Amino acid sequence: MTILGIETSCDETSAAVLRDGTLLSNIVSSQMVHQKYGGVVPELASRAHQLLIVPVVTEALQVAGVSKGDPDAVAVTYGPGLMGALLVGLNFAKALAYGLNIPLIGVNHMQAHIYSNFIDDPRPQYPFLCLIVSGGHTQLVLVRELLQHKLLGETLDDAAGEAYDKVAKMLGLGFPGGPIIDKLAREGNPEYIRFPRSLLGNENFDFSFSGIKTSVLYWLRDNGFRSNDSTQRLPDQQLKDICASFQAAVVDVLVEKTFDAAARFGIKEIAVAGGVSANSELRYRMRQRTDEGRYHVYFPKLEYCTDNAAMIALVGWMKLRTGFVSDLALTPVANLSL
Ligand SMILES: Nc1ncnc2c1ncn2[C@@H]1O[C@H](COP(=O)(O)OP(=O)(O)OP(=O)(O)O)[C@@H](O)[C@H]1O
Ligand SMILES: [Mg+2]
């Protein structure tokens, strides 16, 4: 069974080929056009997907050594994401499914992030908790069995990745900000400023990151720095200290809330997914909390943290094996929930 996966929900155009659960190729083209805007511009993302979709799919097929007519099914993200961006991938997948007369499988992008932990071994055992931390979402999910998800909590305002990107923009750093802050923070003092740990100690498992972001903005203003100004950079060490202090606040909340939920629900298996799961401090702190083997923590390989079609193809295969097939009239759902 050969599955072609397609992902175009945001600013990565990606295609992957999976055969009987084994990944043969995963091509990701990250759109550089957004860098100068400090965030993804939806209209530009749609246009870039339109240019990239054919070459990216062609390369994924070539690398996998399969021809255009070989896939037995096509799996594609149909939400959540940017409407125009989703339309490009979904329409391409529909045309392919129609032309080749093969099943179309619509995949929820957030569900796919969870299963990015199943592309390689070791894989989490059911039931497990998944902390999804991406550019658009921060969600804590209980996965009782294959494709059965219960949302325990989510962000009330900014997503963790969004906070990273906005703070990077304020500090005059580039886009996406997560990897840049991660790198600078390694040489900074995490106790330089104590930014708020919002909603920590609350009864529920919701998150809030806009307070931390605003605190960075106020600190810059109170200390005479204009935000969003790369010509007026903080002294190097101070910049690293702010990055480390901001990251410490975000990671504290993510780690503590996740382990609180694990204790409350008696879960020993914990997976992390989404772009922010590439963060070195989050990886270190989560692994530190495993209490001498009491908990098992899983992270995807770095290339499967941010958007990729490998995770889409994998969930497509999982769904197809349960007998699921989408109607060719499938339309994108920008705010699709889990
Ligand atoms: N090392 C890192 N540390 C912190 N954040 C990171 C790191 N690497 C990437 N990110 C962040 O991950 C985010 C991108 O992740 P991802 O591609 O999963 O998000 P998205 O697809 O845009 O959002 P969603 O999946 O919610 O639709 C960006 O906000 C980026 O800054
Ligand atoms: Mg994503």
Image: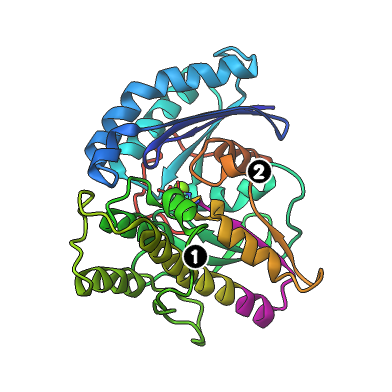
Between circles 2 and 1, the one closer to the viewer is: 1
Say which mark, if any, is on residue 318: 2
Asked which quadrant contains residue 321, the reply is top right
Q: Is residue 337 left or right of residue 293?
A: left
Q: Is residue 107 left or right of residue 289?
A: left
**Nearer-N-terminus badge (2/1):** 1
Q: Which residue is mark 1?
A: 139
| Whether residue 8 is situated above or below residue 54 in the rendered picture | below
Residue drawn at the location 27% of the way across and 46% of the way down? 38
Residue drawn at the location 42% of the way across and 43% of the way down? 78
Question: Does the magenta run of residues contain 264?
Answer: yes
| Whether residue 178 is situated above or below residue 304 in the rendered picture | below
Which region of the structure is painted magenta?
259-274
Q: CA distance from mark 2 to mark 1?
A: 22 Å
Residue 198 image offset from top left, x and y in percent: 41, 79
Q: Secondary structure at mark 1?
A: strand
